[in-house]
Amino acid sequence: MCLAIPCRVVELRGDEQALIDVAGMRKEISLALVDGVGVGDYVIVHVGYALTRLDPEEAEKTLALFAELGDAALLDAASALH
């Protein structure tokens, strides 16, 4: 099963790369498949690639649902990004 966790872009890097943060974990990803991503945007990531940019309100709602499940659920899901 695959969970779509909103990941916040914290830094843009050269060659269509970005640094994302989810639950305090950071990872470098590729932005090659999504145009117009900026710092502070939320993206959905799969196997190291941003697949889509999310509406900030929708991303916050999703993160709030994970928070209701508890930090362990979010950390477990976020660890799948590595």
Image (tube, grey):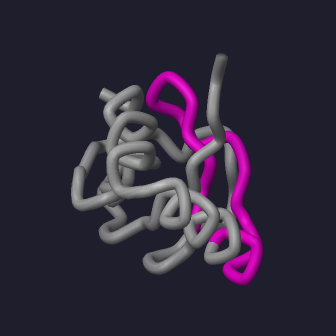
Residue shown at the point (53%, 46%) measured from the top left:
31
Q: Is residue 32 above or below residue 62?
A: above
> Which image quadrant is residue 64 in?
bottom right
Residue shown at the point (50%, 22%) measured from the top left:
47
> Which image quadrant is residue 56 in?
bottom right
Q: Name the one closer to the observer, 66 or 30.
A: 66
Image quadrant in which the N terminus is located: top right
Residue shown at the point (40%, 27%) measured from the top left:
80
Magenta segment range?
42-59
Instruction: Report if residue 32 lies within the magenta region.
Output: no
Q: Is residue 45 left or right of residue 4?
A: left
Q: Is residue 5 left or right of residue 25?
A: right
Q: In the image as oriented, which residue stretches furthest toward the front?
A: 69
Q: Is residue 22 above or below residue 8?
A: above
Q: Is residue 7 above or below residue 36?
A: above
Q: Name the one closer to the observer, 4 or 28.
A: 4
